[in-house]
Image (cartoon, helix red, strand yellow):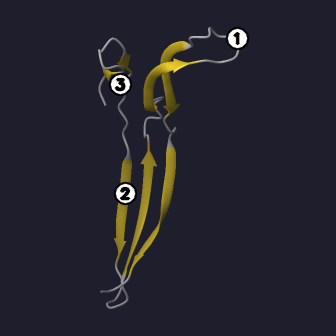
Amino acid sequence: VGSRAGTEDNHVKLEPFTIFDLVLRYKIPLAPPTGRLEAFFSIRNLTDTDWRQAQFYYESRLPGEPAGGVADIHFVPGTPRMFMGGLTWLFPT
């Protein structure tokens, strides 16, 4: 996702990011009509990039800050590298 406007008047830009994922699947041959078995393995955020999943620009106020608040970019950190694997059973139709 490229840099984009954080406000309507475009005076704040939100950080861009690029994420790469990898997904591998293998169909395990079974004798019909038993269904189909698939094994899968995936890596999310393959390069372990620090990224911001959601970004918003607004005023907030913590104890000890000015009464009017402080305008800044607030964000949810993106997930780090994650590994997943498993089996999928597909019933015959």
Residue corresponding to mark 2 = 24
Above or below residue 15? Residue 87 is below
* Numbered mark located on residue 16 in the image: 3
Please give the label number shown on residue 64: 1
Image quarter of the N terminus? top left
Marking on residue 37 = none
Q: Earlier in the sequence, mark 2 or mark 1?
A: 2
Q: Seen from this angle, which residue lies furthest top?
A: 66
For this orientation, the residue located farthest to the front is 67
User: Pointer 2 and pointer 1: residues touching (CB < 8 Å)?
Assistant: no
Query: CA gap, disc 2 to disc 1?
Result: 51 Å
Q: Residue furthest right?
A: 64
Q: Residue at x 30, y 23 (%)?
A: 4
Mark nearer the viewer, 3 or 1: 1
Query: Of circles 3 and 2, which is in front?
Result: 3
Nearer the camera: disc 2 or disc 1: 1
How far apart are the alpha carbons under marks 3 and 1? 32 Å
Type of the residue with mark 1: Gly
Locate residue 3, reporting x and y percent: 31, 22
Q: Considering the numbered disc 3 on the image, is that residue within a helix, a strand or a loop?
A: loop
Task: Tell me the SS state at disc 1.
Answer: loop
The residue closer to the viewer here, 40 or 15, is 15
Identify residue type, mark 2. Answer: Leu
Amino acid under label 3? Pro
Q: Quadrant of residue 16?
A: top left
Q: Quadrant of the C terminus?
A: bottom left
- Mark toward the start of the polypeptide (3 vs 2): 3
Q: x%, y% of residue 14?
A: 38, 21
Horizontal and vertical percent for residue 13?
Answer: 35, 17
